[in-house]
Image (cartoon, helix red, strand yellow):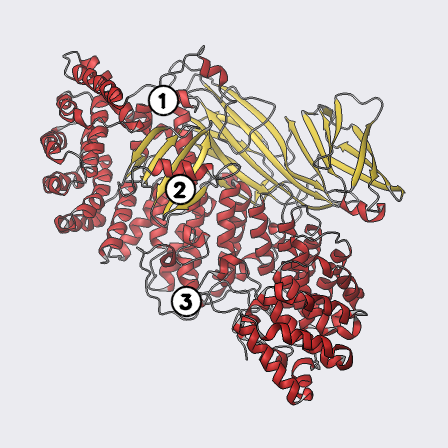
Amino acid sequence: MFSQIFILSPRGDTIINRDFRSDLPKSTPETFFRQAKTYSGDANPLFAVDCIQFAHIKRGGLYIVGTSRFNLQPAMSLELLDRLAKEIKDFCGVINEEVLRKNFILIYEILDESFDFGYPQLMATEQIKPLIVNDPIQPQPDSVMNSLRPKIQTFNIFVPNTIGSQAVQRSVLNKNQANEIFVDIYEKLNVLFNSSAYVINQSIEGCIQMTSFLQGNPPLKLALNEDLQIGRQQGQYSAGVILDDCNFHECVNANELDMNKTLRIQPPDGQFVVMNYRISGDYAAPFRLFPIIEEISSSKIEVTIKLKACFDAKILASYANVRIPIPKQTANAYPELLKNAQQETAEYDSNKKIVEWQIKKLQGGQERSLKIKLTLQATQTAHTARKEIGPIAMNFEIPMFNVSRLQIKYLRIEERGNTTNPHRWVRYITQSSSYVCRI
Amino acid sequence: MAYFGNNQQRGELQELFTDLNDLNFDKKKEAIKKVIAYMTVGKDVSQLFQSVIKCLEFQDIEMKKLIYLYIVNYSRQKPDDAIMVIQNFRKDVRKSENPLVRALAIRTFGCLRVPKLNEYLIEPLKDCIQDDDPYVRKTAVLCVPKVFEVSPELCPALLELLQKLLEKESNALVLANLIQSMREIEVVNGKQLILMNPKIIQKLLLAIDECMEWGQIFILDYLATYDPVESKQAEIIIERTLPRLSHINPTVTFCAVKLILKYLDHLDNGDLVKNLCKKISPSLISLLSWNQPEIQYTILRNISLILQKFPILFENEVKVFFCSFNEPYYIKYEKLDIMVRICDSKNFNQVLNELMIYINEADPHFVRKTIKSIGKIGIMYDKALSEAVSILVEFAKNVQQANESVQELFIQMQILYRKNRNLYKTNDSLKILFNILEYANEPEAKSACTWIVGEFAEFIPKSVDKMKEYIDNFLIEDRLVQLQLLTSGVKLYIKYPSLCSALIQQLINSAKDSFNPDVRDRTYIYWRLLSTDPEIVKNLVCSVPTNSSQFQKDIRLWETKDLIIALENMGSISNLFHKLPNQLYKNIKIRNNHQQEAKIYKADEKQDIPQKEQEIKKEDQNQQIQQQPKQDFDLLNFDEPVSKSNNNKIDVYDLI
């Protein structure tokens, strides 16, 4: 298992250094940093120097590194570091150099409870909370470091770009907190269209995530759709919501899911993923793209792309971006929007040979279109060049909307006689993961 | 300057020293925090050892934690001073009411790693192993391997205690730590410590449900090394493991998969095996969709391994491995590799259609891999051959510059032509290739081009001129190209004796004095043969095989006995590199395995995936006889450089 865990600043200074096994030289952090700097971009998450395995993740600009001489499981070591980062964040509120330097003693405490001899021990925030004696020290709000701090990273898999959650920056040790719980249902869509807008392949990766600030961590009961079904039989069609597969957090008891469609949850403090699910079946894609390519002459091509938002008019996509790769031999490209276009831009990047079409807000049911006029260099004819157009990729986010129709019917506190009524916040977010149209 | 710097540091230390000896408690605590801060950044504060230790008399737990941190760091530098701490430790372990303090003391004690202190540790450690509080027990249990590493001679009594504890322990967390520390000692010691019996297995299975995810990993991982005695037992263990397949932690899921896959061998109920496979594959697929790309990568690397033994798992699931445009390339490469492995006589069309689209991607390296994969599929399935060729020819039409992917195109086309010589007619492929011959610049691709020119000389209008061009540059070519040039030159001479007599003379003249013995020897052999009887050479070099030969490829990653070891280490770093643990780490010994045959789990339908010793007939056998084996290997080797270094793998081809 891990021999050491250390945390380095972006400049390579050691902020935290805990040696569990003393089987590696003391200069290992320097070895790591020197090697990490040899990569042109971000360093590989796992690499080896002189038979020492380094696993690292980057959070808030800091390197969190685990080292080992053993044949360890790479997936597990990265997961452990990620979990450690989450713990630190739960205690300190944020992860950045200043906070870590101020709280280094607290971090050593957390490390000692989380690992012994390099083996993971207790790694859930609420489990180690009673064992920790130090209180977190919050950074001065007016300090220079603070204002320079980069945007705070969150640790969930899904990071919404537009809606910031108020739940993100709070420490679990904060005693005067509101009694509330946040529930997020995220869905990421993978869709592949062919040129006639026919779906070739589609799937949804979704998760239900909670951030709990409930006092006393009471047991919860979460009810999902009544027509929910888990596991797909071949050739079966059903009107209900069918999940191909799902998995649950440790605190979730899913025994009643099949019968009553309810989950019993013993919520830990802070953020956790209640359930991940995967759907591979057909669903109505929220956007449809209709590309039309016309060869005007041997050196001119016109590409027209129609985008249709196929969801309810009450729902508003917070943004939708479309990227259209165009032939390498393009001499020039003029993207043209419709005359009445609002909150839309279209730009041609001549280095990357890509046209970027950005739409700020898009209401359900609306249609937009873009025309690109391409002039080719003399070396290539329109007939061969048209093959190089595409595939068109889309990026979008639609708040308060989910494709799978998986819903939270209710979320109750199970304890009888509990008079407090905590605030419960639920939101739905749909994002694109890989939304591609081939031409 | 140095003197000045020194002086300043001494000043800081002096200040800390004063503060540490101050009577005010808060001041002491602040001073200790500063000491730890210095320690973290790597400054030497070992001189303060005695002053720091003195502060241990306070019962403040925060202070204790800090001091222990300090002691652990400097005990090996100051073993004599560290002895003074022993009394404090023993007091904490024996007398303290607070389990936290007891555990803290024993944990720190274990980390001292000073051999002469360890004898004082044994007694308190024994007490802690039998402590009433599970938190203390779990800490104490992990303390044993720490001591064992430094002074194994002190440990027999402790080990016995651990074995007893295993019999009666009921706390899941302690059990998990117990298993882990005993395994670690087993590795160092070489002796079996954990004596499995049905009772312990029962207990471990119960513990899986209760303990935390990391504990689950330890226990599942251990159970996966166990060989169940009978089918019923395997069935029970699998039954208890199934719920872990839907755990949110990918490592737990993966350990469960590993365990179940291993135990399948022990089941004698065929239907059950099939049902289990149906349960495992969605979990494995899910691992690919929910996690960060890094974790996906590790899973993909292991899937290519699992596939060799369990083709049944991903039957009908090839779509899962289609690349999406925004994935990192390292994921795409793995997916390509798996798509080829998964491809069978039923779905090759689907795979080829998908690959056809990848061929237009921007990254030349990815395109190169795609072309290679198309070539492999063409070789493996006779029915896929013409489809593969037409995709490649389509690609060749659009080639406009020399890049990586074009090189691969030549190499793959040569191999496909070898499989079926008549392919040159398909879609004018020969003509299109000939037009872009000048783009070949890698030795392997160039050698493929010279082969094509020689082999199909009669169908290429200017083949002699082209050959002349090549032979003019003979001396600057790579050895691989030179060897191929010799054979192709002779072929051309046989076909057009009068046109090429000067050419062959030029070729022999430039090659006969080569520094490379291979090139020189081959030159002389051809020379002698030609001067003896050109007719023999014709039979040897130019004979056209009558029927299209069966020329297939073994895509197995591992030899059977290595496969079993590799599957036992599923999920580890060594598998990520597709190596055996002992190849990567010198300190790891692998269990000797006598099992020679691995059971392969296939779907019901008969498939023609090559998996046993393939009968590989060679096309132009006559010609190949003359070529030295190494050359042969180079030409036909499809494997990535990574696996080339895998010396445990058999050569890809068995020659008959």
Mark 3–mark 2 Cα distance, whole angstroms, equals 30 Å
Q: Residue furthest right?
A: A297
Q: Amino acid at mark 3?
A: Lys
Residue B601 spot, x, y in % from top left: 51, 64
Q: Secondary structure at mark 2?
A: strand
Mark 2–mark 1 Cα distance, whole angstroms, equals 23 Å
Q: Quadrant of the N terminus of chain A?
A: top left
Q: Is residue B164 left or right of residue B636?
A: left
Q: Is residue A321 left or right of residue A130?
A: right
Residue A373 spot, x, y in % from top left: 84, 35
In front here: A41 or B516?
B516
Q: Which residue is mark 1?
A: A101
Q: Which mark is residue B561?
A: 3
Q: Amino acid at mark 1?
A: Arg
Question: What residue is at 39 percent from the left and 38 percent from the top?
Answer: A32
Q: Are marks 2 and 1 on the same chain?
A: yes
| CB under 8 Å between discs 2 and 1 | no
What's the chain of the residue with tag 2?
A: A
Question: What residue is at 48 percent from the left and 65 percent from the top?
Answer: B270
Circle 2 packing at 10 Å, graded few (<14), some (14-19), many (20+), is many
